[in-house]
Image (spheres, rainbow, N blue to C red):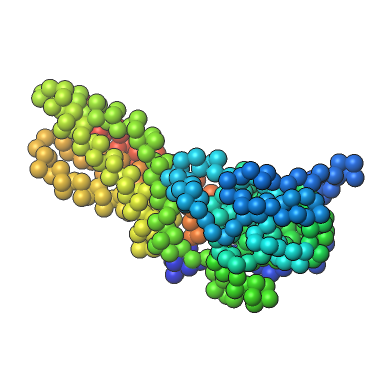
Amino acid sequence: MGKGKNDQSRLQGQNLQTSDCCSKPSPLISIESICRPPEEKIQVSLPSLDQPFVIGSIQTPVGMVPQVSSSLIWKDHLGTFRARWGVGRMRYTIEPGLYALGQPDKDVPVLVTANYKMSFDCLREAMPCRDVWILVLDTKGINVWCAAGKGAFGTKELVEHIESSGITKVVTHRQLILPQLAGPGVAAHQVKRFSGFKVIYGPIRATDLTAFLDAGLNATPEMRCKTFTMWERVVLIPMELVGAFKPSLIIMPILFLLGGFGGQEGFWANAFNYGLFAVLAFLSAVFAGAVLAPLLLPWLPGRAFSMKGLALGLIVGLILTAFRGGYLTDLSSRFEILAWMGLVPAVTAYLAMNFTGASTYTSLSGVKKEMRWALPLEIGIGVIGLGLWIGSRFIA
């Protein structure tokens, strides 16, 4: 979890410098998974030239390599917008392999990235008027950081793509520049051992790459620090909203119709009173957990995301109670308010906890530890709240 200054957090537990002197294999990767008999060597395979963002080709010793530009077109921006909102997100990929940015020759740097097109576009857009090779790994459409954590951007994949891309015949040097956030998945000493290429970890942000290259592959402390500013949190909200909206399409009609039972005013009158308020309360919980929680993240109390969401949910629940206060005339209405004072914080805490996957504040072990106690707590509070709300309709 993050401490102190919440807009900047250091990546921990990683060697951010080049590592090629250690001969001990990583315990996470077996030698057998990388080495193969000579007859099983991977054949060179180049990406297609028919991809819409390809502007030409460069002749190399291994064939025609697709050429791309650092200038994005409107289709690239539209694709990014759609992916942000979850439209075709897992299909927003490019073919893995070797690409040429500008007019690269045998001596220019080789940058490595994922085949998630947004990652690829961010990289090439950050390199205007530069000539470099870009080696794209097959990460199944997952960005670098997440792919490194899941194992899709790893040592084995990198070694295999070095071979299948033909990069050994394209450049004379033996250096690869990887994103710093790829560190959790790549054992640099094993890449050196099995491919002959030295891994150099570049800066966290693609926008710092030109300064990094101009400084002789030296990174400043600021280049090694992962920020998590307000804007960086805002751009992640659409995916959280889309994820929460899909089940909401089922939950909201059920709440509306259940609100119609009980009472003496008739089904539809009750539905538009109790059911409509239930829908409003649920939407308020979703909005708080998926939108307000990431926006207010540094200022919400507690370290665990679930506790931040729970605190925010309690505030939203109190506001709803004040809004509903004029209706506290009987026992069923009081049960209803108690129900939403449990349901709203439970939903908000759950959605806020989901945000850990997009955050720099958390570690894998911290997330697992939190989920072991937070998830049962959220389910328990939610079940009690739901029981009270259903009970309020029977009492009515």
Residue 164 as seen in the image, left or right of residue 91: right
- Across the whole image, how many numbered discs are drawn on residues? 0
User: In the image, what residue occupies the spot 54% across and 44% down?
Assistant: 92
User: In the image, what residue occupies the spot 64% across and 75% down?
Assistant: 214
- The image position of residue 230, as x and y in percent, is 39, 62
Classify 246 as above or below 183: above
Which part of the image, by quadrant, shows the C terminus? Answer: top left
The answer to whether residue 100 is seen in the rendering is: yes
Outermost residue to the right? 38
- The image position of residue 283, as x and y in percent, is 29, 41
User: In the image, what residue occupies the spot 61% across and 52% down?
Assistant: 55
Which quadrant would residue 50 be assigned to in this image? top right
- The image position of residue 390, as x and y in percent, is 26, 29
Q: Nearer the viewer, residue 162 or 126?
A: 126
- The image position of residue 181, as x and y in percent, is 60, 60
Residue 369 as seen in the image, left or right of residue 40: left
The answer to whether residue 157 is seen in the rendering is: no
